[in-house]
Image (cartoon, rainbow, N blue to C red):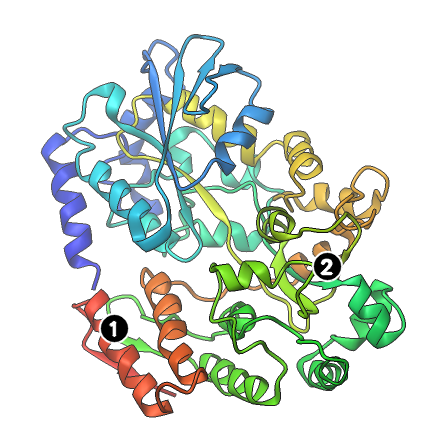
Amino acid sequence: MKKKYISMLLMAALTAGTLTGCGDSGNKDNSSSQKTSSENNSGDESTEEGKVINVYSWNDEFSKRVIAVYPEVKETSKDGTVTTLKDGTEIHWIINPNQDGVYQQKLDEALLNQASAAADDKVDIFLSETDYVNKYTDADAGVAMPLTDLGIDPDADLSDQYDFTKVTASDVNGVQRGSTWQCCPGLLVYRRDIAKEVFGTDDPVKVGEKVKDWDTMAKTAEELKAKGYYTFSSYADTFRLYGNSISEPWVKPGETVIKVDQKIMDWVSTSKEWLDAGYLDKTVKGQWNDDWNKAMGSKSKVFAFLFPAWGIDFTLKPNWDGGDGAWAVTNPPQEYNWGGSYVHACTGTDNPKHVKDIILAVTGDKDNLLKISKDYLDFTNTKSGMKEAAEDNKTFASEFLGGQNSFEYFTPVAENIVIAPLSPYDQGCVELIQNSFSDYFQGQVDFDKAKSNFETAIKERYPETTEVQWP
């Protein structure tokens, strides 16, 4: 199924013939044959690095963290597009929005031109999200370098990372081709004032008992409804919890069949029940739209949202129009992970030493990661660091959460996450299954029509697919 995409990338790579790490199949047995060129780049101090490090991303999240903790940073331009290092090297931050696939389109274009691009135009670092990381870490695509080719030993240098993040950043042979500063366990984030009115308390432990599993949540939803409140804003709010529980990938390697997991259909049936029961706001159709943003405001009747750390900082906080201390976190009804930004060294980079330095500084240095957690509230990717944060209620108290230490709740969730099996088609499947059944939830189409609409939409997105199998 990936043949068309991979062949295009390989064609571009093969025209150069000598790309850094080119030809690596991801098989550990042939690692010795790959070492010569990559070791020259990462370990030979006489190898001259380029003058420009091009970093592709969809927002300024990564650039802010590099600027905050990378010790070689000298200054950054006022518009934030160029960071100059102490040795004169410039980091150019190339940002394209994720919406409508724009970021991936721009990145793919650059990757296709990587072989023939001038040294200072080559992609050096690029980022991917969990929903499509598999597309770029695929060994046959050959666009994300194995970390070992940079001189990074994942077993030693990244031993403190959460295991599931390392698996997510690896190809099917277990070769790690990326790293992340984030771990994205999710919690339930709730309005303290609504909790006090409905339950008589806003204590996170007591509220946690009211939302500890889905059966209990349904009873709690009835209590909230009786007082005029919605449990969540939208059926889309719960999708990640179900989607993280699938037992098989949407598409197995080498196959052309999209398989819809039973957990996805459980989400469909539960969402319809909750909508009909009045536990969700029917006017909020999905996420990342104006109605959803407004549901986070002080005039909203929505009790809770399901967010990882980045969701609180980047989504909830900017949409809240009240004072600090109005929200708190507690355990979710089901453990889940949502998102994660993975940092990849691009095959063909002319700055392997700088790239190695940046990846280690931002994703492998415990002190740096703790600083990121303190400054940005990110749940970062060291097990020992997050254990320390969970026990330090003074340093890691959140003003926005009324002085609560959210890491105390994030940490146990992170320790129990098992990442759902991934495929290169996750982003399209996740987006289109929600879009197709949104019309069903809104009463615009019946159940069978929603299914057929998904089949049509997914085959338009991925023409190489041959069949959609329903549980």
Q: Tell me, for residue 28, which label it has, or none.
A: none
Front-most of residues 141 and 85:
85
Which residue is at 78% across, 43% downward?
Answer: 399
Front-most of residues 120 and 441:
441
Front-most of residues 386 and 441:
441
Tell whether 206 sits left or right of 157.
Answer: right
Tell whether 156 sits left or right of 116.
Answer: right
Tell whether 267 sits left or right of 98.
Answer: right
Whether residue 256 is visible to the viewer of this picture, yes or no, is: no
Tell whether 67 sits left or right of 144.
Answer: right
Using the rendered view, name the quadrant where residue 160 is placed.
top right
Q: Position of residue 286 (x, y in %)?
A: 47, 69
Q: What element carries label 1?
A: helix
Which residue is at 74% across, 75% downward?
Answer: 212
Separation of residues labelled 1 and 2 (CA atoms): 38 Å
Q: Tell me, for residue 457, which label it has, or none.
A: 1
Q: Where is residue 83 in the image (x, y as percent from the top left)?
A: 45, 19
Which residue is at 81% across, 37% downward?
Answer: 395
Amino acid type, residue under disc 2 in the picture: Pro
Q: Name the residue under label 2.
A: 412
Q: Position of residue 140 (x, y in %)?
A: 24, 50
Front-most of residues 308 and 259:
308
**Is residue 138 positioned above or below 152 on the image?**
below
**Is residue 353 positioned above or below 235 on the image?**
above
* Neighbourhood count class around disc 2 (C-alpha, 10 Å): few under 14, some 14–19, many 20 upward: some
Q: Nearer the viewer, mark 1 or mark 2?
A: 1
Whether residue 432 is visible to the viewer of this picture, yes or no, is: yes
Q: Where is residue 23 in the image (x, y as percent from the top left)?
A: 21, 40
Locate the C terminus and report the quarter of the image it occupies: bottom left
**Is residue 290 positioned above or below 260 on the image?**
above
Locate the N terminus and report the quarter of the image it occupies: bottom left
